[in-house]
Image: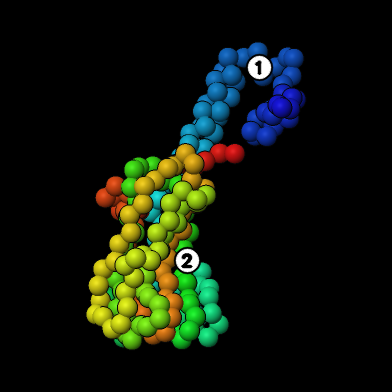
Amino acid sequence: SYKAVHSGSFMQSLGLSAWRPFGIYRRLKSTNIIMKKLLALVACLFLSWNTYAQNQTISPLNLSFEETENNLPKGWYISGSPSYKANIDAKIVQNGRNALLIEGNGGYKIITLGLPHNYTGKKITFSGYIKTENISDGQAALWMRIDPKIAFDNMQDRGIKGTTDWQKAEITLSLNPEATDQILIGAMLSGSGKMWIDNFKVTIDGTDIKDAKFIIKTV
C-alpha cells in the first residue's frame, strides 16, 4: 500500500522549501525553479541507473583466472574432497598469465561461478580449454546448470580421460529467461589425475556475455 507523505516533508527531502499558503508558490518564477530542480533530480537518477547497468554488463568475470587471491582464482567457489588440491599455475597455461590446476586421487573437485544476470536469448554457450594428465576412474569436464531444474550438462557422456594436450570443451543449453533464477558454470575433476583449465568463455546466441542483453527480475 502507498503511504501518504506530507507535502512539506516531501519537498524538504528534495532540498526545496516547504509549502506555505502565501509566499513562494504564488509566484511563477519560484514555481519554475522548483520544476527545474525536479527535472534535474529525475535526470540524475536516470544517469545513475544507466551507469550502474553498464558497469554490471561490462564487469569482468575472471574467466581466464588472471585475478587471483591466495593462489586461487578470485570470484570462484571451490568445493569437493579435502584431499584434492587446486591452485593457480603460471607455467602451464593455454592463454594469458594463469591457468588453474586441479589434482587428486579417489575423490572429486568442483569449481563454480554464478553468472551475474539472467540473460535474454535462445542459447547460452560455455566453453573452455582443458589439459589432462593420467586421469583414471573418472574424468575432467566442464559443467553448466540453469536453475531451477531448467537445464544441466556436465559432459558425463564425453568427459576427458587419460593424458591429453589442451583441447576445447563446450556446452550449449537452451535459455528460459522468464523461469530462470540463476545460471552456474564451472569445471570438475573426478577420479585420479590432474587437469588444467583456462580461457573460459560464455556467449549468448553468439554474443560475448559482456555485451549480451540481460534482464533484472523483480519480486
Q: Residue at x 42, y 72 (%)?
A: 188
Tag count: 2
Q: Residue at x 32, y 85 (%)?
A: 133
Q: Quadrant of residue 195?
A: bottom left
Seen from the viewer's position, the closer of residues 35 and 90 is 90
Secondary structure found at label 2: strand
The quarter in which the C terminus is drawn is: top right
Identity of the amino acid at label 2? Thr
Seen from the viewer's position, the closer of residues 78 and 190 is 190
Secondary structure found at label 1: helix
Across and down, in percent, residue 80 comes to 53, 75
Q: Residue at x 32, y 74 (%)?
A: 160
Confirm whether residue 199 shows in the render.
no
Across and down, in percent, residue 113 comes to 46, 63
Q: CA distance from mark 1 to mark 2?
A: 59 Å
**Is 172 drawn above or below residue 175 in the view shown?**
below
> What residue sits right under mark 2 in the picture?
112
Identity of the amino acid at label 1? Tyr
> What residue sits right under mark 1 in the picture?
25
Colouring scheme applied when the structure was drawn = rainbow
